């Protein structure tokens, strides 16, 4: 009989080997997983073991603990003094003196991320690598470059020995040779880099100040030629001319203004004397204004039908470089030691080309208001306001503001008291009275040119010598105003003339083909003028005086149609309303009177506007239309 064989005995040897390998691999994986779990538990929310910053170990610390440890170390390091030494001298530098700032939080974040910034497999590999190879991260920061450069400048001032340029010197009327000699200076670039690295490394030590050799800018092997030339240059006076003007440089002055350069002649560095524009600066400051002529800006002129550019004129200024060269050449001559001051042209601020590019050539519109003489003061106001309003250029899209353009109406600017419309339709003398003739004339020129009107108001009183429905008042101080915009593709030129009686405005630009037609609605009359009397104690008994002439109410409109070159049109209606204003008669105290109560009239379709104007010789304010 045969006994039973076990299952193990039945397996072939190769199967048993594979089984043992799988068991071993499983054990290794289990151990690796266990080790990973333990490592993860130990480093959870902490800097991994083996990580340091600038040599400071942070492994096993939480973010807050690492920041506190690193901050404490930084604070201690900031109190350390860096010593710089050279030639028996020393300088002390505290990190705070040059604004040293270290980024602790950034360093801690980078330390935390060493084993957390990639995928699980890569980070796991980094964790185990740290047990065999440590990771030391740099502590980054900044140093204030301006403060550090100032510190280095102080050291350089004590240590630098500048090179000596080859040259010649004047002493007791004799020319002496100066040999070139190299210097030694602080190597600022190298020292700067060393200090920046040291200040950010948290280590204090002594630094030897690096020095470097600096060669002279002017070297010479041959001095004899320069010596001979220099003696010729100072051998006699030099005459400098410009037209009829003449200046003399003495041999002593020539020596003061002389300088030297080094030229390579046939492989030999040779000293060459010349006049230095920098050393000649005091002389040039003296003659420059006498030699120069100011440029003249381009302008515009017109004959009432066309406008044209009056070309600008080039100016002249002393050419320092060319003059210095001419002086050098003249002093190297034994005879005929005369040189002409060289000049160069200077452009005007507003050139002919810039003026022509503005496209101002055609008369777009012209308007003249009917002559109205008025008082002599009124004529002064109209004339000077036209000057203030005139010769203005508007770029495409730019707005013209009449009130801002003419400026405040003050006696210092030439304005006189003349009748203006004050509250309730009364005429009183105010500074600038009558200038609405200027705004009205300009409005009508703008109207005829087909330009965009932004703001326009009619007077509260109907004025017969202005075109019906086409008057334009201004009140000043932010009240009623006249404004328009250049809605063309070219510049326009506003030009006005006035003798105080007749006022004309012309508008020039480039004709774009637009035409303007206008129609007047006629007047619609409202309430008839009433009459009231008020007592005036200053009048004698029974005497009367018309204080306000008043008017009947009326309204009208003017329609403007602009037809453009492409056939399109733009229609706009300008409405005017003149309210009824009672005739006010002042009477002496013995007459029975009816007191006129103050009223406020608001024009249809508008909001009332009140402008305060101080009357001459008073401190009270009233509503004023000029």
Image (tube, grey):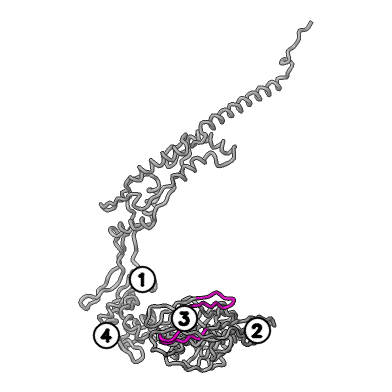
Drawn side of residue 24 relative to residue 102, left or right? right
Q: Give the mark, 1 or 3, whose residue is nearer the N terminus.
A: 1
What is the distance, in whole Å, between disc 4 and disc 1 at their CAs? 28 Å
Spot occupied by residue 578 in the image (x, y as percentages of width and height): 56, 83
Q: Are marks 3 and 4 in contact (CB under 8 Å)?
A: no
Q: Position of residue 377 (x, y in %)?
A: 42, 90
* CA gap, disc 2 and disc 3: 47 Å
Q: Is residue 350 left or right of residue 222?
A: right
Magenta stretch, residue numbers? 582-609
**Label 1 vs 2, first from the N-terminus:** 1
- Label 1 belongs to which residue? 269
Which residue corresponds to mark 4?
Answer: 236
The answer to whether any part of residue 22 appears in the image is yes
Callout 4 crowding tier (Cα within 10 Å): few <14, some 14–19, many ≥20: some
- Asked if the magenta segment contains residue 13, the reply would be no
Say above or below: 162 vs 39: below
Please tell me in which quadrant of the rendered image residue 160 appears. Answer: bottom left
User: Which element is circle 4 on?
Assistant: loop
Secondary structure found at label 2:
strand
**Label 4–label 1 contact, CB within 8 A:** no
Mark seen at residue 595: 3
Badge 1 crowding class, 10 Å Cα cut-off, few under 14, some 14 to 19, many 20 or more, is some
Query: Which numbered disc, 4 or 2, marks the residue that appears first in the sequence?
Result: 4
Q: Which residue is mark 2?
A: 561
Tell me if residue 509 can be seen: no
User: Residue drawn at (35%, 80%), measured in percent from left and top?
Assistant: 324
């Amino acid at each position: 009989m045969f006994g039973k064989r076990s299952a193990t005995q039945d397996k072939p040897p190769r199967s048993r080997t594979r089984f043992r390998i799988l068991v071993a691999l499983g054990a290794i994986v289990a151990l690796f997983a266990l080790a990973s779990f333990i490592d993860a538990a130990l480093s959870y929310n902490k800097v991994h073991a083996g990580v340091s910053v600038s040599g400071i170990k942070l492994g096993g610390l939480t973010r807050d603990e690492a920041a506190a440890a690193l901050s404490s170390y930084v604070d201690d390091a900031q109190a350390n003094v860096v010593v710089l030494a050279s030639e028996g001298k020393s300088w002390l530098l505290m990190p705070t003196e040059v604004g040293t700032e270290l980024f602790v939080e950034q360093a801690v974040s980078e330390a935390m991320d060493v084993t957390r910034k990639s995928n699980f497999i890569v980070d796991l590999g980094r964790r185990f690598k740290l047990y065999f190879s440590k990771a030391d991260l740099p502590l980054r920061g900044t140093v204030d470059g301006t403060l550090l450069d100032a510190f280095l400048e102080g050291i350089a001032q004590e240590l630098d020995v500048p090179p000596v340029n080859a040259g010649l010197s004047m002493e007791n009327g004799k020319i002496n040779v100066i040999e070139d000699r190299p210097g030694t200076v602080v190597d600022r670039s190298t020292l700067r880099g060393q200090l920046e690295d040291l200040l950010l490394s948290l280590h204090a030590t002594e630094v030897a100040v690096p020095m470097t050799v600096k060669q002279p800018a002017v070297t010479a092997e041959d001095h004899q030629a320069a010596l001979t030339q220099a003696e010729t240059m100072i051998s006699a006076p030099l005459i400098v001319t410009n037209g009829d003007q003449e200046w003399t440089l003495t041999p002593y002055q020539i020596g003061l203004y002389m300088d030297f350069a080094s030229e390579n002649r046939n492989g030999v560095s040779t000293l060459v004397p010349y006049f230095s524009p920098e050393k000649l600066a005091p002389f040039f400051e003296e003659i420059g204004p006498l030699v120069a002529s100011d440029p003249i800006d381009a302008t515009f002129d017109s004959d009432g039908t066309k406008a044209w550019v009056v070309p600008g004129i080039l100016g002249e200024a002393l050419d320092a470089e060319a003059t210095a060269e001419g002086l050098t050449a003249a002093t190297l001559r034994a005879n005929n030691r005369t040189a002409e001051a060289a000049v160069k042209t200077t452009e005007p601020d507003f050139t002919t080309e810039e003026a022509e590019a503005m496209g101002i050539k055609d008369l777009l519109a012209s308007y003249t208001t009917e002559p109205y003489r008025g008082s002599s003061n009124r004529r002064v106001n109209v004339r000077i306001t036209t000057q203030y309003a005139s010769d203005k250029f508007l770029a495409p899209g730019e707005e013209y503001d009449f009130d801002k353009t003419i400026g405040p109406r003050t006696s210092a600017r030439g304005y006189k008291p003349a009748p203006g419309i004050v509250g309730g339709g009364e005429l009183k003398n105010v500074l600038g009275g009558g200038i609405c003739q200027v705004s009205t004339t300009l409005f009508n020129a703008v109207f005829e040119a087909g330009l965009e009107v932004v703001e326009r108001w009619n007077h509260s009183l109907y004025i017969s010598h202005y075109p019906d429905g086409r008057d334009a008042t201004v009140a000043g101080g932010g009240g009623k105003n006249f404004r328009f915009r250049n809605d063309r593709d070219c510049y326009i030129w506003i030009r006005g003339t006035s003798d105080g009686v007749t006022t004309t405005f012309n508008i020039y630009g480039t004709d774009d083909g637009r035409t303007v037609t206008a129609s007047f609605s006629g007047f619609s009359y409202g309430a008839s003028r009433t009459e009231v009397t008020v007592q005036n104690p200053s009048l004698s008994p029974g005497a009367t005086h018309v204080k306000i002439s008043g008017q009947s109410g009326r309204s009208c409109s003017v329609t403007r149609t602009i037809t453009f070159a492409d056939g399109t049109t733009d229609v706009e209606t300008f409405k005017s309303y003149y309210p009824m204003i009672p005739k006010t008669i002042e009477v002496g105290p013995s007459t029975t009177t009816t007191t006129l109560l103050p009223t406020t009239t608001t024009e249809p379709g508008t909001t009332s506007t009140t402008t305060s104007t101080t009357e001459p010789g008073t401190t009270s304010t009233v509503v004023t239309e000029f």
